[in-house]
Image: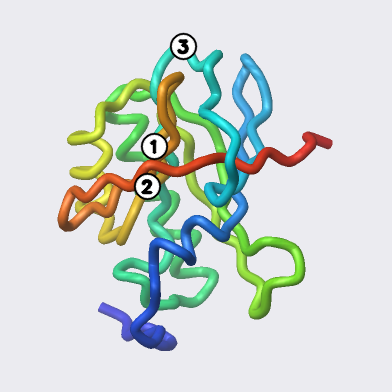
């Protein structure tokens, strides 16, 4: 296995995830938000949405080509399992340095346990989990759920 580029220092991961921007589109609409606000959940969601990536496992930064290949493997696994999903991304908020962006997927219909299990399988620290009732971060290893408020961005 290829060594990571760097290992981030001990961090407040909840704050880092809350202060990030998440974007995905599906046939029912566009979603562009951060988890650091006071707005309520997306009440019009017909089923849950889990945002997952295979980038930078265990929060160890990897080269772009490694991350892209890992995401292709995740995409194939989602297809083989028969899940409905759409392209998604997470990124730093404007003005945050260093800036970053990771591609991933918005998967429909998972429950919290399945979202956490897939996150652990792909060595992700956390996944974003949205329902019509809640906006959450699920820390995969501990299955800790953090309820969040939304800051919505205007879709372009």
Q: Residue at x 44, y 77 (%)?
A: 61
| Label 2 or label 1, whichever comes before in sequence order | 1
Is the C-beta separation of discs 1 and 3 under 8 Å? no
Horizontal side of residue 65 vs 138, given as left or right: right
Q: Position of residue 63 (x, y in %)?
A: 49, 76
Q: CA distance from mark 1 to mark 3?
A: 14 Å
Q: Which mark is residue 137?
A: 2
Q: Is residue 42 above or below residue 24?
A: above
Between 85 and 114, the one lying in front of the other is: 114
Do residues under tags 2 and 1 come within 8 Å of each other at their CB atoms?
yes
Tell me how far mark 2 sits from mark 1, CA to CA.
Answer: 6 Å
Q: Secondary structure at mark 2?
A: strand
Residue holding disc 3: 46
Query: Which of these two is toward me, 98 or 149?
Result: 149
Q: Is 38 on the left or on the right of 46, as rendered?
A: right
Disc 2 to disc 3, how far (Cα)?
19 Å
The first of marks 2 and 3 along the sequence is 3
Q: Which mark is residue 147?
A: none
Front label number (2 vs 3): 2
Circle number at residue 129: 1
Q: Above or below — where is 64 with respect to 46?
A: below
Q: Quadrant of residue 142?
A: bottom left
Residue sitting nearer the eye, 55 or 138: 138
């Amino acid at each position: 296995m290829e060594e990571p580029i760097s290992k981030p220092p001990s961090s407040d991961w909840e704050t880092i995830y809350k202060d990030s921007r998440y974007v995905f589109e599906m046939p029912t609409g566009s979603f562009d938000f951060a988890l650091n606000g006071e707005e309520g959940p997306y009440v019009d969601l017909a089923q849950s949405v889990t945002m997952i990536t295979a980038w930078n496992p265990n929060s160890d930064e990897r080269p772009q080509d490694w991350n892209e290949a890992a995401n292709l493997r995740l995409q194939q696994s989602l297809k083989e399992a028969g899940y409905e999903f759409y392209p998604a991304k997470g990124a730093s908020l404007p003005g945050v340095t260093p800036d970053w962006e990771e591609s991933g997927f918005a998967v429909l219909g998972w429950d919290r346990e399945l979202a956490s299990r897939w996150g652990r399988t792909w060595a992700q620290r956390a996944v974003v989990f949205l329902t019509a009732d809640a906006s959450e971060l699920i820390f995969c290893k501990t299955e800790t759920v953090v309820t969040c408020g939304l800051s919505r961005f205007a879709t372009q």
